Image (cartoon, rainbow, N blue to C red):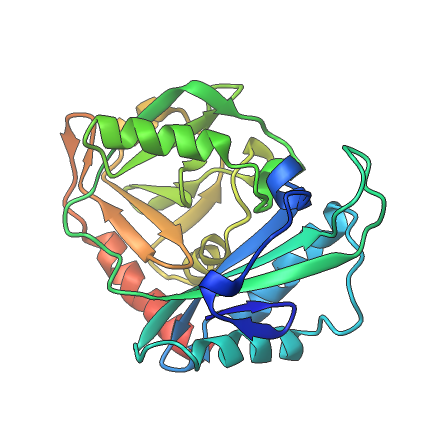
Amino acid sequence: MVNVNGELLFEENVSLSINNRAFLYGDSVFETIKVSNNRVVFMEDHYFRLMASMRMMRMKIPMSFTLEFLQEEIMKTVKLQDDSPQYRVRLSVFRDEGGYYTPEKNTISYLIKVSPLVNPVREEYKIDVFKDFYVYSGLLSTIKTNNKMLNTLASIFAKENELDNCVLVNEQKNVAEVTNGNIFIVKGNTIKTPPLTDGCLKGIVRKKMIDILTKHPDYKIEEASFSPFEIQKADEVFITNAIMGVQPVTQYKKKKFTPKVSLALANSLKVSEITG
């Protein structure tokens, strides 16, 4: 079942208007959230990112949209699903219909969709660079909107070339992110990830990983631009997002990696998931 503006409906009974602005213009933001053992993981971080995204999109935030309200709506939807220890939740917020490029109003609707989650982390994970189109650096690239054509094209490219993911670069040819998350490279005791100014998603787990590494006695974290060539020179590479947590990369082009640091950091993240 799905949750549409607080109403729980079977999926086959949900109908969205052909004038829905998310469909017509991508006028929508969303959060992909993990629920584990009846607990919404990093809910506060997701909530504040959603509020910031809605403000940037000039959407009117309802007074009812408190952290507690949205968490209750998520869990209300989760409890009606088939029993599973973990769930993937997509919370979509879209501007109400009306107008063309210029909306007639800024009020919103929301939809919560839930699906069971099996372990998403893979033992072998191969990536390469997608060069056909670029991420454009700037604040709009840092939020999760429905405008994901670049990610779709890169994912098709990955499938056609038997890859698990693709690295996306910006107009300056610097690494921005991967199709579904943020990227980190390890070189010695330095771990580097692209800065938000390079156009990467303002990832929830990216932020958590930076927090973990800032306090880590053995590693130094840098938010700094780097080229795809630096990925080949790295000792390790890993990807982060809210669903996978930490996904070690085992191959980039012909370079193979043995994950050690990334596996240790994945365990640190799991502790952070439990403690909040």
Quadrant in which the N terminus appears: bottom left
Determine the residue positioned at 51% across, 64% down.
13
Indicate whether 39 appears above or below 93: below
Can residue 270 be seen? yes
Q: Farthest residue in the right direction? A: 104
Q: Residue at x 74, y 48 (%)?
A: 97
- Report if residue 33 is visible in the image: no
Relative image position of residue 63 (x, y in whole percent): 80, 71
Out of 63 and 131, give the one closest to the viewer.
63
Say which quarter of the image contains residue 136.
Answer: top right
Q: Is residue 56 left or right of residue 213?
A: right
Point out the residue furthest to the front here.
13
Quadrant of the rendered image containing residue 7 = bottom right
* Number of numbered discs on residues: 0
The residue under the point 33% across, 25% down is 129
Residue 213 on image: x %, y %: 41, 57
Where is residue 219? Give x, y as percent.
Answer: 35, 53
Residue 147 position, x and y percent, is 57, 37
In front here: 266 or 147?
A: 147
Task: Determine whether 226 is above or below 33 in the image.
Answer: above
Vertical side of 14 occupied by 196: above or below: above
Rendered position, 51 above or below 179: below
Judged left or right of residue 131, residue 56 is: right
Is residue 43 or residue 95 the one in the foreground? 95
Q: Residue at coordinates 30% horizontally, 77% vertically from top-left?
A: 85
Name the side, left or right, on which 51 lies relative to 118: right
